[in-house]
Image: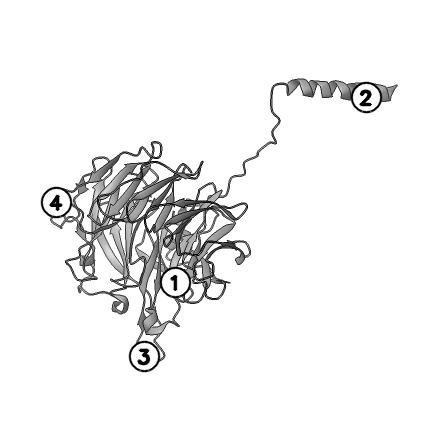
Amino acid sequence: MQMRRWMLVVALLSLLAICLSCGQNYRSPIIPIPGNPGDPSLYHFAMTISRTDPTINAAIPGAVTQIDVSGDSNAGVVNMGRGPVYAALLTGGAVNRVYVANGLEDTVSTTTAAPASCFPTGSVCPMGAVSTITMPGGSSPSYLASTEASNMYVLLPGLTPPAVGVIATLQNALTQQIALPAGNPVAMAELPNGQKLYVVDQANSTVYVVDTVSRQIVQTLAAGVSPTMVIASPDNSAVYVMSNIGVSVIDPLTDQLVAGNLSTTGQPNSIAYDTKLNRLYVTDTSGRVGIYNAAVPAGTLPSTFLITPAGFVPGAIGVAPLPDGTRFYVLGIDPAQPLGTSLTLTAVDSATLSPIASNPPNSPNPYPLDSLNTNGTPVNPVLQTCPSVRFRFMVGASADSGRVYVSSCDAGGTYIFRTSDNTGVLLMPAPIQPPIPLPPTVPTPQNPVFLITGR
């Protein structure tokens, strides 16, 4: 009898559950597990990756210099692999782990930044130990990208066929290769949601869409002529591909090109995204800066062009928007000036699109960065012309909007510019490596080839 009562209770509960679910589709519960964003104070740094001219001595390793934002000082230097060409920060986590692609030895090096928590005390915390991840022989790692905490992707253009390598960050090991068509892959970007990776092939003027779950190419798109750079919007709504004729826009939902690419006056030479104002900045060879409103649907992005009172920004080659959205800085290079003495920085009000005077008030606008180099010559002159360096000059803003950094391979160091009063602070030289073991035994200077400004 008691068993029959229990069976009756179970049957009634089952009927009740069926009634409650009437008209609904059953779905497995999704429990979001947020990643650890880390302590924001740990991101108060910039990093410059430097190398020795390989024609002088290819055996000398590259180096990473950490710059303390608040103190404008060198917070530490560690050696990486030979011939570094690109670097990327691993997303999330409580530590700042940086990965560096070493093109001359087929490796990827990784280390962590020294935390800023001990800088105010007067002691300098050491940077983390360096780990080396071996790539296949002849792979020539050239580019890194990831929005995942567990994987870092690396381009391996030297393989036949070229490939995207997958580095498992927990093991610090290459675990898989995603084969690409024969060509020249030069850049890639992953959606912030980690679902797709977009790989730019300059030789074939295409973009390969890689599903990060299946690790397969799921779409191939034509993207202008000789594309060289790609970035993804922070809301996963658009992917922007810079080519010789403009900027192509990809809709990640359909993986199709949006009708009507973003046109520029001259050939585009840099692209940057303003996450605070949802703007896209594109500089071109005419000296103009195209400013596109990325908050509207892709393909209908209205544009306005910044024109300073003097006309164009001389030799505009990059834009660094401040994270607080108040202004952006345009890096220019005057072709009429000698290399190593020609870089300028123009501050622009984000609301009015008007230039902001530099300090002191009688200083030229744009600000001549190379004036910080008091003797007028590069600090490390061995690579002063840097003809083969892809990222010869780079510009970026610190996470607190307090500084703008410009790495110059020609000048042999990193310029520090204070945004509170638009004043140049100093040129921090790249590290000096031990003497070349051949007469004359003089210290070997290095020159910047990449810049990271933290988060």
Q: Nearer the viewer, mark 2 or mark 4?
A: 4
Report crowding for label 1: few under 14, some 14 to 19, many 20 or more residues within 10 A (C-alpha).
many
Three-letter code, disc 2:
Trp
Q: Which mark is residue 162?
A: none
- Which numbered disc, 4 or 1, marks the residue that appears first in the sequence? 1
| Residue under numbered circle 3 | 441
- Which numbered disc, 3 or 4, marks the residue that appears first in the sequence? 4
Three-letter code, disc 3:
Thr
- Residue at x 28% of width, y 42% of height: 281
Three-letter code, disc 1:
Pro
Foreground: 71 or 407? 407
| Residue under numbered circle 2 | 6
Q: Nearer the viewer, mark 1 or mark 2?
A: 1
Give the quarter of the image for residue 98. bottom left
Whole-number angstrom distance, CA of label 3 to CA of label 4: 49 Å
Q: Secondary structure at mark 4?
A: loop
Q: Secondary structure at mark 2?
A: helix
- Residue at x 19% of width, y 65% of height: 377
| Residue under numbered circle 1 | 84
Residue 139 lies, in percent from the top left, at: 45, 63
Q: Badges 1 and 2: C-beta atoms under 8 Å apart?
A: no
Q: Secondary structure at mark 3?
A: loop
